[in-house]
């Protein structure tokens, strides 16, 4: 029996292999194919799982820039790719500080920290470090040609994308 007939007859609510005229070996093959497809679909869904944007909890040293809710840092994972973004400012003058902490499953791969130079207010730059072992996003080295303190309420936007090798799902 050709495959086209099998699909056509399957649409006629034929429930048993005998009605479908499928041999024992065809049944075994179809069972294996079905199981393999289920496994492949499950693996694919894990790879493309999207957590959606999750609002971060800021440390006590930082606030959303301008106190606007739209600037609150957020993070998400699509498969094993993580994206984190936001705009913050220190509540008081600081030399460095921890902005937030990413949970397990959203941290950079083992042995790999994410380092990024970010734009600050005016011509100032600052250094963002995302630590793979504890998930902390920290700010350091604020300035133009030498490092100084972060003034209170300074503009600190950031956006980083990286891969995690942690458990997905």
Image: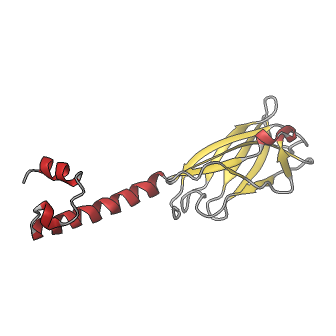
Q: Quadrant of residue 40 in the image?
A: bottom left
For the N terminus, the image quarter is: bottom left
Q: Quadrant of residue 107 in the image?
A: bottom right
Q: Quadrant of residue 126 in the image?
A: top right
Q: Is residue 40 left or right of residue 114?
A: left
**Where 126 sits versus 19, above or below?**
above
Identity of the residue furthest to the left in this view: 1
Q: Is residue 46 left or right of residue 95?
A: left
38 or 129: nearer the viewer:
38
59 or 72: nearer the viewer:
72
Residue 118: x and y, percent? 70, 39
Q: Is residue 93 left or right of residue 20?
A: right
Residue 161: x and y, percent? 58, 45
Residue 13: x and y, percent? 24, 57
Residue pictured at 21% horizontal, 59% vertical: 14
**Where 116 sits versus 145, above or below?**
below
46 or 127: nearer the viewer:
46
């Amino acid at each position: 029996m050709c495959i086209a007939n099998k699909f056509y007859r399957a649409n006629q609510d034929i429930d048993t292999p005998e009605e479908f005229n499928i041999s024992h070996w065809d049944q075994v093959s179809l069972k294996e194919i079905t199981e393999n497809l289920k496994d492949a679909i499950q693996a694919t869904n894990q790879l493309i799982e999207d957590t959606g944007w999750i609002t971060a909890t800021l440390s006590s040293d930082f606030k959303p820039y301008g106190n606007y809710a739209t600037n609150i840092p957020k993070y998400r994972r699509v498969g094993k790719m993580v994206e984190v973004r936001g705009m913050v400012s220190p509540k008081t003058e600081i030399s460095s500080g921890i902005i937030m902490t990413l949970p397990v499953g959203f941290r950079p791969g083992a042995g790999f920290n994410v380092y990024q130079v970010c734009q600050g207010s005016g011509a100032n730059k600052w250094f963002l470090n995302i630590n793979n072992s504890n998930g902390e996003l920290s700010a350091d080295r604020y300035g133009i040609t030498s490092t100084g303190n972060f003034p209170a309420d300074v503009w600190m936007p950031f956006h980083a994308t990286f891969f995690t090798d942690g458990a997905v799902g």
